[in-house]
Image (cartoon, helix red, strand yellow):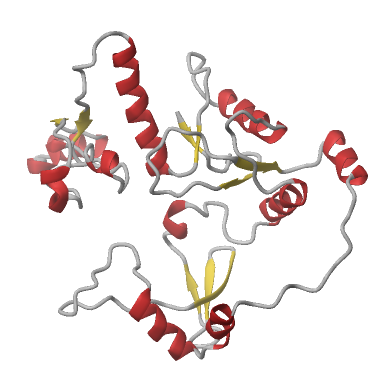
Amino acid sequence: LVSSRWHSDVGVALRASSSASSSSTSAPGVGVGVGGNSDRAEANDADRPRHPPHPPPPLHPAVERARTRSTSSHLAFDRAHVWHPYTSLSPRTSPAPVLPVESASGCTLTLEHPPGRRLVDGMSSWWAAVHGYGHPELNDAAARQLNRMSHVMFGGLTHRPSSELASLLLECSPPELTKVFLADSGSVSVEVSLKMALQYHRGRGRPARTKFASVRGGYHGDTLGCMAVCDPVAGMHAAFGDVLPVNIFVGRPPCEQSKRLSREGGGGSNMEGCQG
């Protein structure tokens, strides 16, 4: 089972509609544009009627106000009303300050304030922008796909881009993996895989098999099913332990660095293994 992400070799631009917090196994509608035009795609583009340009509709007053706020007012509104990931709303701790990003290109972010200040995004937008921001091939593929169709539900419908993406994923998967389920985020893909495992055992007449074995030190996402297979002690979800399903956790296998440190006499607790 795979999550809908870019294919690193050919530049697949994806769009998925479902919320990342969803835990349903219903497949999201996915619009996919693959870098490079085929003859079929070029013919379809040529035959498609083009709507005449028309002026954009007036903005909702709330959006108009948001767009015209000063930077300081924008940050004040954000601090008062927007709950960012991994932050606290407690008045005692107060949310950490955030940086106002104006644009992004390559590996850099340009801030709104101080004006023109540029920062290197060393986290690659939580590893989602591995090809950098504003990649021309990905931007072009996304624009072509939006002109064709931005999204259709995947229940009872299919389209060529989904078949193209599945073909690419099968090419880089072990031969025994012959099915592709498209999910819209890493957490949802883990939720779906957990539910598939439970459904499999129920179908085989083993409904009592409901526990999962997970390696300590792992991080698999922030939805409830994902949290239940993350490290229960050293992970970031200990506060939810009393409401999560109880699973089985096994020790991490030693990584090469741990083995080297042990040989050099400095192993110690490193023999518990490495995360990653």
From the top left corner, tell me how far across and down residue 19 is, in percent: 45, 49
- Going by the picture, which residue comes out furthest to the top? 205
Where is residue 95 drawn, in percent x and y? 27, 76
- Residue 8 picture quarter: top right
Residue 157 vertical position relative to residue 257 in the rendered view, above or below: above
Horizontally, residue 195 falls left or right of residue 56, namely: left
Q: Is residue 206 left or right of residue 24?
A: left
User: Residue 99, located in which quarter of the rendered image?
Assistant: bottom left
- Which part of the image, by quadrant, shows the C terminus? top left
Closer-to-camera residue (10/183): 183
Q: Is residue 149 visible?
A: yes
Front one among 156 and 115: 156
Q: Quadrant of the N terminus?
A: top left
Q: Total label count?
A: 0
Residue 209 as seen in the image, left or right of residue 56: left
Vertical placement of 184 versus 51: above or below?
A: above
Q: Residue at x 24, y 11 (%)?
A: 206
Q: Nearer the viewer, residue 150 or 133?
A: 150
The quarter of the picture where residue 258 lies is top left
Residue 231 percent coordinates (x, y): 18, 42
Q: Position of residue 37 (x, y in %)?
A: 81, 41
Q: Residue at x 19, y 50 (%)?
A: 237
Above/below status of 100 relative to 209:
below
Note whether residue 266 is visible: no
